[in-house]
Image: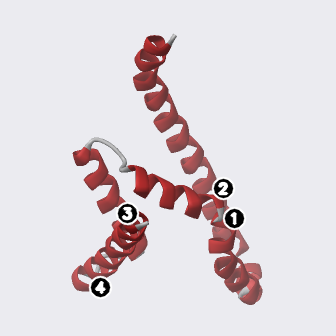
C-alpha cells in the first residue's frame, strides 16, 4: 500500500513541478503536459515503469472519462463561443486527433519492435 501512495505522490509532484515551471518561466503550455514530459523523461532514464506506478497509472487511465468530465462541462458551458469560432475549433479537433493517432501508431510500432525479441524467448 505505501508503494501505491508513493506512486500517486510522484504523479502529483510531477504535475506540480510542471505547473511551477510553466508559471515561473512563462511557458505557454499546460503545466500538466510539462509534468507528463518530465515523468516520461524520468521513466526513460530509469529504463522501466515501477510496478506500483503502473498500477496507479492504469487505474487512472481506466477511469479517464471521469477525469474528462469537467472539460466536457466547460465546453458545454461555452457552447456560444464554440458556435462563433467553430472553424478553428474544428481544425484543432481534427488536427489533434490526427496527431494523436500518428504518435500512437509510431509509439506502438516501436514498442512492438522492441517487444518482438522478448516474445520469441517465451515460445
Which quarter of the figure has residue 89? Answer: bottom right
The residues tagged by marks 4 and 3 sit, at their Cα atoms, a distance apart of: 30 Å
The residues tagged by marks 3 and 2 sit, at their Cα atoms, a distance apart of: 39 Å
- The image shows residue 45 at horizontal and vertical percentages of 22, 47
Q: What number is the disc on residue 94?
A: 2
Disc 4, SS: helix
- Residue to which mark 3 is pinned: 3
User: Contact, CB < 8 Å: mark 1 with mark 2?
Assistant: yes
Above or below 22: residue 45:
above
Disc 1, SS: helix
Left or right: 83, with 102 as reference point: right
The residues tagged by marks 1 and 2 sit, at their Cα atoms, a distance apart of: 6 Å
- Residue to which mark 1 is pinned: 90
Q: What number is the disc on residue 4?
A: none
Label located before the other in sequence (4 or 3): 3
Q: Residue at x 26, y 54 (%)?
A: 42
Which quarter of the figure has residue 31? Answer: bottom left
Q: What number is the disc on residue 23?
A: 4
Badge 2: few (under 14), some or many (20 or more) residues near its Cα, within 10 Å?
few
Amino acid at each position: 500500500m505505501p508503494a501505491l501512495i508513493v506512486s500517486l505522490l510522484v504523479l502529483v509532484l510531477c504535475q506540480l513541478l510542471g505547473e511551477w515551471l510553466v508559471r515561473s518561466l512563462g511557458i505557454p503550455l499546460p503545466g500538466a503536459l510539462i509534468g507528463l514530459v518530465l515523468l516520461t523523461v524520468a521513466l526513460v532514464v530509469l529504463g522501466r515503469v515501477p510496478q506500483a506506478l503502473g498500477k496507479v497509472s492504469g487505474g487512472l487511465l481506466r477511469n479517464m472519462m471521469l477525469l474528462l468530465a469537467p472539460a466536457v462541462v466547460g465546453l458545454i458551458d461555452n457552447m456560444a463561443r464554440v458556435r462563433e469560432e467553430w472553424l478553428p475549433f474544428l481544425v484543432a479537433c481534427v488536427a489533434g486527433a490526427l496527431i494523436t493517432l500518428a504518435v500512437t501508431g509510431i509509439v506502438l510500432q516501436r514498442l512492438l519492435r522492441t517487444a518482438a525479441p522478448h516474445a520469441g524467448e517465451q515460445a
